Image (cartoon, rainbow, N blue to C red):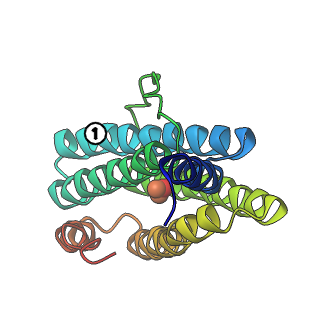
Amino acid sequence: MMNNKNNLSFFTVSFRTLKNNIMLSEKIEQLLQDQVKKEASSSQTYLAMACWADVKGFSGAAQFLYTHSDEERVHMLKLIKFLNERGSQATIPALDSPRKEFDNLKEVFQSILDHEILVTESINNIITVCLEEKDHLTNNFIQWYIAEQMEEEQLARSIIDKLEMIGSDTSSLYLFDRELATANQGA
Ligand code: FEO
């Protein structure tokens, strides 16, 4: 039977091992923190687009964008919780006010696609660093994001394609706007 002193040293060693396993490297912590800001910025950007669509009478697109904004906030929260669970404390970033004027609906979705391509590059970079540092926990966590990015880019591209086909046909645009209301359900 272990005496109290041995018991204590066993727990001290175990705690140290556990702490070393969960702690993030400074580099990965900073990358995840930067990603928190990118997801927060995505959420605010899509919220501003939703407001534009709302006042321009694109109620379907507005609904799509409000939902998309909420989803980006969820992405941000997942990162915040992961940072907090891995021995860090997430910083909530300050953000600039996003763009609020657009020429048309196609420009809105082209901006979304351009933005998401940058986010995908950022996630890819996190994966590269995780592999270099053999941080399998973070790599496993961040895989969800890369799958999500593929879906988001694909959806934005398909919407842009449809808007290009519609062109200046206002009746088709009206019908497509109604479709957009539910276009991101399950995405
Ligand atoms: Fe969560 Fe679309 O970036």
Residue 119 placement, left or right of 152? right
Q: Where is residue 66 in the image (x, y as percent from the top left)?
A: 23, 51
Please tell me which residue is depicted at 59% across the width and 48% down the height of the picture.
9
Q: Is 146 situated above or below 26?
A: below
Residue 134 placement, left or right of 136? right
Q: Nearer the viewer, residue 30 or 169?
A: 30
Q: Is 96 situated above or below 68?
A: above
- Ligand 1 lies under 8 Å from the Cβ of mark 1: no
Q: How many labels does the image show?
A: 1
Q: Where is residue 108 in the image (x, y as percent from the top left)?
A: 43, 50
Q: Position of residue 60 (x, y in %)?
A: 18, 61
Residue 25 placement, left or right of 114? right
| Label 1 Cα crowd, 10 Å radius (few <14 / some 14-19 / many 20+) | many
Q: In which quarter of the image is residue 167?
A: bottom left
Please tell me which residue is depicted at 41% across the width and 76% down the height of the picture.
162
Instruction: Residue at the far right: name it.
Output: 132
Q: Where is residue 104 in the image (x, y as percent from the top left)?
A: 39, 49
Residue at the spot of label 1: 52
Quadrant for the C terminus in the image: bottom left
Please tell me which residue is depicted at 58% across the width and 71% down the height of the picture.
140
Q: For the residue marked with disc 1, what is the amino acid?
A: Trp
Q: Which of 109 and 121 is in front in this view?
A: 121
Q: Nearer the viewer, residue 28 or 115?
A: 28
Please tell me which residue is depicted at 64% across the width and 58% down the height of the picture.
123
Look at the numbered disc 1 and give the secondary structure of its residue: helix
Q: Is 95 situated above or below 134?
A: above
